[in-house]
Image (spheres, grey):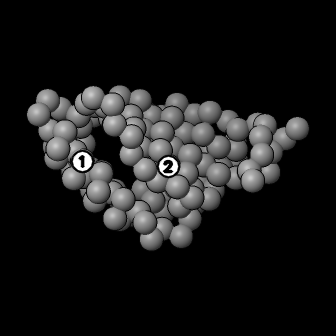
Amino acid sequence: MATQDNCVSIHPYFTVSEGNLSQAREYCERFVALTKNESQCLYYGFSISGNEIHCREGYIGGEGLLAHLENVGALLAEFLEKIATVTRLEIHGPAAEIEKVKEALIPLGPQYFVLEYGIRN
């Protein structure tokens, strides 16, 4: 069974530098504030375990992900410069939608997972 789901999800994992977890939490709030009005965002949130932060996020197609990256790009650059490093980055979605985002994500070096089977309720 193939899927008609065009959601693209992005799964970045960040390691926060020593002593910066409270500041990282402030950045999480800023990211959420910027993202909450994006029309193509399906879900967005941060999970924290020790000094590791995971952002769980999904968008309507590749265009939704690209719009998000444009929206938070400056804040993300600041976050990575001052607070954290990306330790893992996964992109999940249908092959056609993944193709739309590959060029923009080259600097971050993600691993891609092609969605082949599933449903969306």
The alpha-carbon separation of the residues under discs 2 and 1 comes to 17 Å
- Observer-nearest of 107 and 89: 89
Q: Secondary structure at mark 1?
A: helix
Image coords of residue 22 (percent x, y): 17, 44
Please report the residue visible at 47 percent of the width from the left and 44 percent of the height from the top: 56
Q: Residues within 10 Å of mark 2 (few under 14, many from 20)?
A: some
Please report the residue visible at 23 percent of the width from the left and 34 percent of the height from the top: 16
Q: Secondary structure at mark 2?
A: strand
Among the 4 quarters of the image, the one containing residue 115: top right
Image coords of residue 51 (percent x, y): 25, 30
Is 107 positioned to the left or the right of 118 in the image? left
**68 vs 13: above or below:** below
Q: Residue furthest left?
A: 19
Residue 70 is at least partly visible in this image: no
Type of amino acid under label 2 = Glu
Residue 48 is at least partly visible in this image: yes
Image coords of residue 36 (percent x, y): 43, 66
Residue where numbered disc 2 is placed: 57
Is 93 positioned to the left or the right of 64 in the image? right
Among the 4 quarters of the image, the one containing residue 54: top left
Work out whether mark 2 precedes mark 1 in sequence or the reverse, and give the earlier one: 1
Q: Residues within 10 Å of mark 1 (few under 14, many from 20)?
A: some
Residue where numbered disc 1 is placed: 25
